[in-house]
Image (cartoon, rainbow, N blue to C red):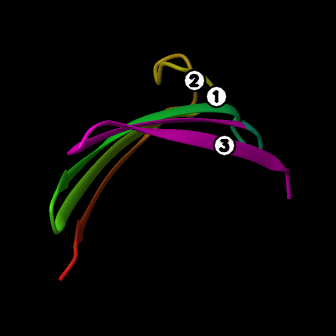
Amino acid sequence: KTPRLAGGVEYPLIKMLDVRGGIALGGVDDFSLATGIGFNFGPLQLDLAYASSAKLQPWNGNGAKLALSTILEF
């Protein structure tokens, strides 16, 4: 019920490595920053991400969110 505006960017650092970042304003957390990396090994992709809740450091805010995902294309 509370509006939230979010956006992010992705930069291919090298062929096998993408760097990501984002920011969100509004919603339950009011403010959130996110960062992540993606590894591309041909048909296998591995993504790791971290997002803060209300503050940049989890010990000053409401906690943090961690994510790990894999993709296998065949």
Q: Residue at x 54, y 16 (%)?
A: 60
Q: Position of residue 13 (x, y in %)?
A: 31, 33
Measure the C-alpha gap from mark 3 to mark 2. Answer: 20 Å
Does residue 40 appear left or right of residue 65 in this picture?
A: left
Q: Is residue 43 magenta?
A: no
Label 2 CA crowd tier, 10 Å (few <14, some 14–19, many 20+): some
Report crowding for label 3: few under 14, some 14 to 19, many 20 or more residues within 10 A (C-alpha): few
Number of dots carrying numbers: 3
Estimate the spatial distance between the alpha carbons at disc 2 and disc 1, rounded to whole Å: 5 Å
Q: Are marks 2 and 1 in contact (CB under 8 Å)?
A: yes
Where disc 3 sits, the SS reads strand
Instruction: Look at the image and give the residue range highlighted in magenta.
Output: 1-24
Residue on which the image places disc 1: 54
Q: Amino acid at mark 2?
A: Gly
- Name the kind of residue labelled 3 in the image: Gly
Q: Which comes sooner in the sequence, label 3 or label 2?
A: 3
Kindly identify the residue that appears in the image at 46 percent across and 19 percent down.
59
Residue at mark 2: 61
Mark 1 / mark 3, whichever is N-terminal: 3
Quadrant assignment, res 54: top right
Q: Earlier in the sequence, mark 2 or mark 1?
A: 1
Would you call the spot at circle 1 few (<14 residues within 10 Å), some (14-19), or many (20 or more)?
many
Give the image location of residue 2, x and y in percent: 85, 51
Relative to 5, is 11 on the left or the right?
left
- Which secondary structure type mostly characterizes the magenta part of the structure? strand
Of residue 43 and residue 36, the one placed in the foreground of this image is 43
- In this rendered view, identify the residue nearer to me: 25 or 9: 9
Q: Which residue is mark 3?
A: 7
Where is the C terminus found, in terms of image quarters? bottom left
In the image, which is nearer the foreground, mark 1 or mark 3? 3
